[in-house]
Structures are given as structure tokens and as C-alpha cells.
Amino acid sequence: MKKNWPLWEVFVRSKNGLEHRHFGSLHAADAEMALENARDVYTRRNEGVSIWVVESKHITASNPENNGELFEPAQDKVYRHPTFYDVPDDVKHM
Amino acid sequence: MTEHLYKYILGIADNSLILGQRLGELCGHGPNLETDIACTNISLDLLGQVRSYFQYAAKITGDGRDEDDIAMMRKEREYLNVLLVEQPNTDFAYVMARQFLFDIHHFLFLQELQKSKDLTLSAIANKCIKEVSYHQRFSSDWIKRLGDGTEVSHDKVQTAFNDLWPYTDELFHQNEADKAMIMEGVGVDTAIFKDTYYQRLKHILDEATLDIPETKYFQKGGKEGIHSEHMGYILNDLQYMQRTYPDMEW
């Protein structure tokens, strides 16, 4: 194949109530084919109940070179995690 | 009755067995990774379906043979598949055209088989039809893409249809076992959906900007056990392990 099909990212919901999670990527000529390919590549062992596909070029990613300014300032601000509250024993699943 | 039922089951199962074997030849040779996996999946679906049929066939004959014996240990003349499914994987256009011509029939056939008086057959049909519904969607989509794609893909798939069309009529032939089982209310009278079959083909081919081949002469023989020259080679691959290591287990 001289010209490759575009790349698509595949998101699968493994069961109702859970969110779609990124499963991987694949090549397809269009959205319909991407769904069929995703079905064959990622869900043939009963992994999912719903599939999303999005062409990879539509995803804007942060640049790893900017990780310093984007993420490091948060590292010494543990108080931003709500971990300093006493949770009553009766409250479950927190 | 048992002999007819046995042969009727083989007639259904052998189509899927041989087509599954043909698709299996593509494993690792598909045009790209995704399509390779898709074709192999369809092959595995078909072989899985075949197991249910052969298990049932083994049960009704009661002569001590199991599903593997029935699948692997017959002679060429004892396979009752149509000639269409033996046709080679000439190129991807042939693979998809063959699949499409088979899938549309397979789906219509299983729809009717669900109504069979034989509860085992109707249960198998009920289980298989979901997979086959996907197969026909997959192959129909590819026919549209290839036909309405580039000039090269259009010509290749048109050539494939021109060559494979003469094998479609045999899908509707009825051998002695078919006729006997239709009489019993067990078998499917394929004549009732022959028009629907060709209408569905035309619908997709129109959308794919392909011409319906003009064919006057149709091929036949497989349903009577008389196969094309390809069949010996297919069985040679299919039966290799059983011939080399009879009754092997693993």
C-alpha cells in the first residue's frame, strides 16, 4: 500500500455504566470501516458494549517538552487533594 | 430419513467448512493488519458454526464417528459444498466478491432454517445468524468500497464478479437430501428466497456502480459431490494432519 489509511483511536466501554476507555489505534479508510475494524481487532473476546472511534488527527496532545510548566507546579501542592478530611466510617466508597 | 438428514447437515456445514478453510489461507496474508484479522475472524466464526452441525451429524449417525472424523476424514466426493466456496483467493476483490455472494445467501438461508421443525437445526441457525449478519455487512461494505473506489479497484471487483457469478445458481440447487428434508419441514426450500437473493445482490452492486454480469451458463456439481480441480488441494491442506498422524490428539 503506497498510501496508508489514516490512523484512528479506539475507545471501548467495557460495560454499561463505565466510561469509554482508550484501547488502542488502527488504520481505516473512514469512520464506518474504523468501527468494523475496531470490532474485529479489539472486541472479539467480549470486551465491550460500545465503541467510539475518532481520527487521531483530531486529537490535540500536550507537548512532553512543556511537562515542566504544565505539571510540575502541582507536585508540591498535596493540599489540593481532598485527603485531609476525616471521613466518617459510615461513608463508604470514598 | 437419518441418511437424508445426515447429508442435509453436511450440505450446510461443508459450505462453511470449505469457505472457512479458504479464508484461513489468508491468515497473515491479508492486505493489511486490520483486514487480515477481520478475514480470520470470519473464518473462525464459520468453523465454530461448523462444529455445531458436525456434532449433531455425529449424534444422529451414531456410528462412533465424532465431529472431527466427519469434518476431516471424508473423501472428496463425500463433501457436499457448493463450487462457489472452493474458488481460490485470486486477489482481495475475489475474496470479497466470493464472501459477499455467499453471505447474502447464508443470511437468507439461516432466516428460514430458524423455522425448521428440527429443533437442533433451528437452534443452530438462531445462534449463527448474528455472526452472519455481521459477515454480510462487512462484505457488502467492501463491495461498495471496491466498486465505487478507484478505477483499478472497480475493474478488479467487476472481473471477480464476472468470474464468480456462474457459481451463484448452484446455491439454489436441491439434491435428493434437500428435497426429502423440505418435504419433512426440516429443510429450507431455497427457491422461496431466490428472487430476494438476486435483488439484494443487485441493490448492493448498483450502489457499488458495478454491472450485473450477463451469464447464460451456470456451474454446478458440488452439491452432488462433484467438485472443481481446486477441491483436492484444499482437502490436502485441511486433512494433512489427520492423514500424516491418524487419530492424533493434542
Image (cartoon, coloured by chain):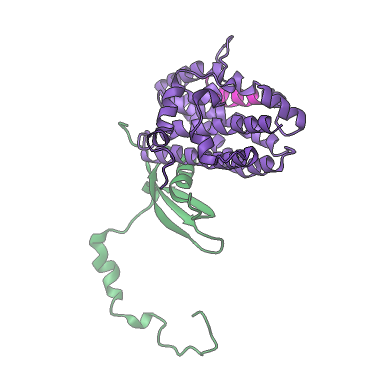
Chain colours: A green, B purple
Find out whether residue B200 is within the magenta segment: yes
Magenta stretch, main secondary structure, is: helix
Q: Is residue B66 located in the magenta-colored stretch of the structure?
A: no
In percent of the image, x 36 and y 37: which residue is there? B32
Side of B62 relative to B68 (left or right): right
User: Residue B202, percent across and down?
Assistant: 60, 22
Is A22 or B91 nearer to us in this picture?
B91
Tell which residue pokes out farthest to the front in this image: B63
The answer to whether residue B237 is above or below residue A23 is above
Residue interval drawn in magenta: B197-210
Does A90 sit above or below residue B91? Answer: below
Q: Nearer the viewer, residue B134 or A7?
A: B134
- Can you say whether A24 is above or below B171 in the image? below
Q: Quadrant of residue B135?
A: top right
Q: Is residue B199 visible?
A: yes
Residue A48 is left or right of residue A74, and the answer is right
**Which image quadrant is residue B191 in?**
top right
Q: Nearer the viewer, residue B217 or A5?
A: B217
**Figure quadrant of residue A73:** bottom left
- Residue B108 appears in the picture as rendered: no
Q: Does B182 sit left or right of A35 as displayed?
A: right
Decide if residue B221 is on the left or right side of residue B20: right
Residue nearer the viewer, A75 or B108: B108
Q: Position of residue B204 (x, y in %)?
A: 57, 27
Residue B80 percent location from the top left of the image: 57, 26
